[in-house]
Image (spheres, grey):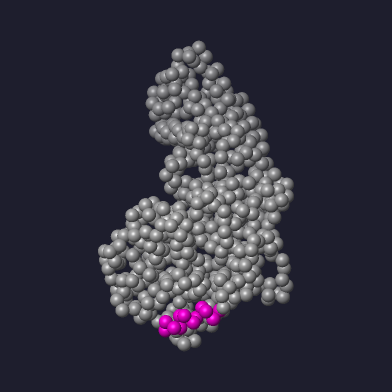
Amino acid sequence: MTTMPFREFLMPPYAYTAMYVVFFISGSVMLYGLYRHLKGYRIGLREFFGLVSDDFGAKASRFFKFGLGQGRVLAEPSGGGMHGALFYGFLMLLAYTTLIFFQTDVLPLFTSASYLQGNFYILLEFLGDAFGMAYVVGLAIAAYRRYVKRLAKLETGWRDSLVLGMLLWIGLSGFIVEAVRFVFVPSQWAIFSPAGDAISMLLSAALRLDPFGFYQAFWWAHMLSVFALLAVTPYTNLVHVFTSGFNVAIAPVKPMGKLNTPFSLAKMAEAGTYEAPPSARRSSDFSPLQLLALDACTNCGRCQEVCPAYASGRDLSPRVVVQDLGRDMRGNEGVDVFTKGVIRETELWACTMCNACVSACPVFIDQVDYIVDYRRTLVSENRLDGKKRSFLENVARNNNPFGLPQRERQSWLVEMGVPTVKQNPGAEYLYWVGCQSSYDPRGRNVARAMVKILKAARVNFAILGNDELCTGEPVRRMGEEGRFQELALKNIEGIRRAGVKKVIVHCAHCFNTFLNEYPEFGAEFQVIHHTQLISELIRSGRLRVGGLDQRVTYHDPCNLGRMNGVLDAPRDVLKSAAGLELLEMRRSGLNSFCCGGGGANVWYQVPERKKIGVIRMEEAKETGANILSVACPFCITMFEDAMKTTGDTQLLVKDIAEVVSETLTE
């Protein structure tokens, strides 16, 4: 028995030479496959390094947190631990193999020193065994989830089964090779490799005659399996082992609520040339980074699991959209996706653009961008039904989705004594009322409540009145990019002329558009959501909130909470009311469930088994609350529509401004 712990190398020298020949061949096959992918994305090496260097700090931080750190993967309660075991188990085994390679093939060229001995070697043996067991257990759990539980979000075909089987075989055969090594060369430190040691005890009797022959056979079987898997990885769905990390590393750094901008209307006007906007009809029409993202998809189904459209029975699964486009891209057929049936128009119009899928994706795929690009194509070709066409025509003619006269924006507010910027040119704040609260009778109640609060706190504010136009948020999400940019440029100029630097909004959609999309077109003002302002007014003592003996649950609007992280201010406002009991829904905060009003869905009908708003109303009722408090007029519209659908009027829907204003004394 050897007393000095060290790594034994039992194969004859020619075996290692042969191994590296096979490794070179399989590595070359793998690299060629990766090259084909990069070529398909239209990303050369220079472009790749350029993409990495842009916003390098933010991308490096994201990669360490969500790539190596697996932040979003580990956060999932059901499968996070399993994926973490697989990922870190694989990384440890790769690190151990790399250390062996340097010890056997690199160091001997320069020195006779060895680091695979003593306490360091014992530590490596233990870590390799522990992480190897985690890797095998993770694979076993993955198989259980696919073949026993048969989770709906997981797509399982023969390729998935083959890859899973190969990975499991590689893990188990590695333990068997280690175990046979212990049988052939008994070691007193084998106890530090508990799995290998236990298996060696089971095999010792059977291998007594020819343990070395068995070791050689299994060593080759294990190594050839590893090299075979390495070679075929770029040609299977395992390509995401590479592409997922690449996508996390180089995906665009942008706010979640910001859509991509395919052209600049201002630059076209300046140049005096109006070109036709880009059209997406083939999967190959996407940008290089969007093509990379299609290959980065792990098909884990997390996007589908959180998608409100999928939950309601609409014809949409963000997982299926990305997978179908990815298959079409890899097929390289260049065929019209609509004609071929790769994408259905009903899929595109079913999306609420709540970004739940984007937030849940562990590899930072922006599923919404694909849907928006195809919507833009449908709009440019006028492939719209009557309601969508009427919506766009109303905005084009009257600068609002309702198609009502512009003068009606201001008249009722002036009657309340609300000054315009012309009447109060030195106003500190511009109150942006928005289309929903300017024209919709229910939405006007929110504006009235907000005006009452601003006056009670003696806030110096004014409105644009008839000069206020639709922000273009639903227009852009419908797919009419040109009209959106036209509205954005006019609104930015109107706010600039008003001379104000702070804009208050109570619509979460306007808030996201002002905050994340308008700056690209020259906006320089500060945007404040009304819940943020009310919270600050209460904290500074300028606004005194009375008591409210009610049980209240709060719904986080997607554009406010998930996309922009405004989570505490609304809750702080509600908690300031004495006697109010705040109850959280099971899905809240960043994981809030959509009301169904995003993506311009308010303005047209989508076939569904169960309304998204009804699903959310049921979650609100589960809390036992009397009031469902919201922070966006679109949420009010969707939830009150859900109440009409179900005939249930027990739960009152109120904006936070309405809740607060009711506690104020005149």
Q: Position of residue 652 (x, y in %)?
A: 38, 62
Left or right of 229, for residue 588:
left
Q: Is residue 498 above or below residue 13?
A: below
Q: Nearer the viewer, residue 258 or 100?
A: 258
- Magenta region, residue range: 406-417
Q: Position of residue 595 (x, y in %)?
A: 47, 58
Left or right of 66, for residue 521:
right
Q: Position of residue 276 (x, y in %)?
A: 72, 66
Q: Position of residue 82 (x, y in %)?
A: 45, 39
Look at the image and tell me whether residue 39 can be seen: no
Going 48% across and 14% down the picture, which residue do you hit? Answer: 206
Q: Quadrant of the C terminus?
A: bottom left
**Most frequent secondary structure within the magenta stretch:** helix
Judged from this view, the residue extending furthest toward the top is 209
Going 39% across and 60% down the picture, which residue do you hit? Answer: 649
Query: Residue 629: which quarter of the image?
Result: bottom left
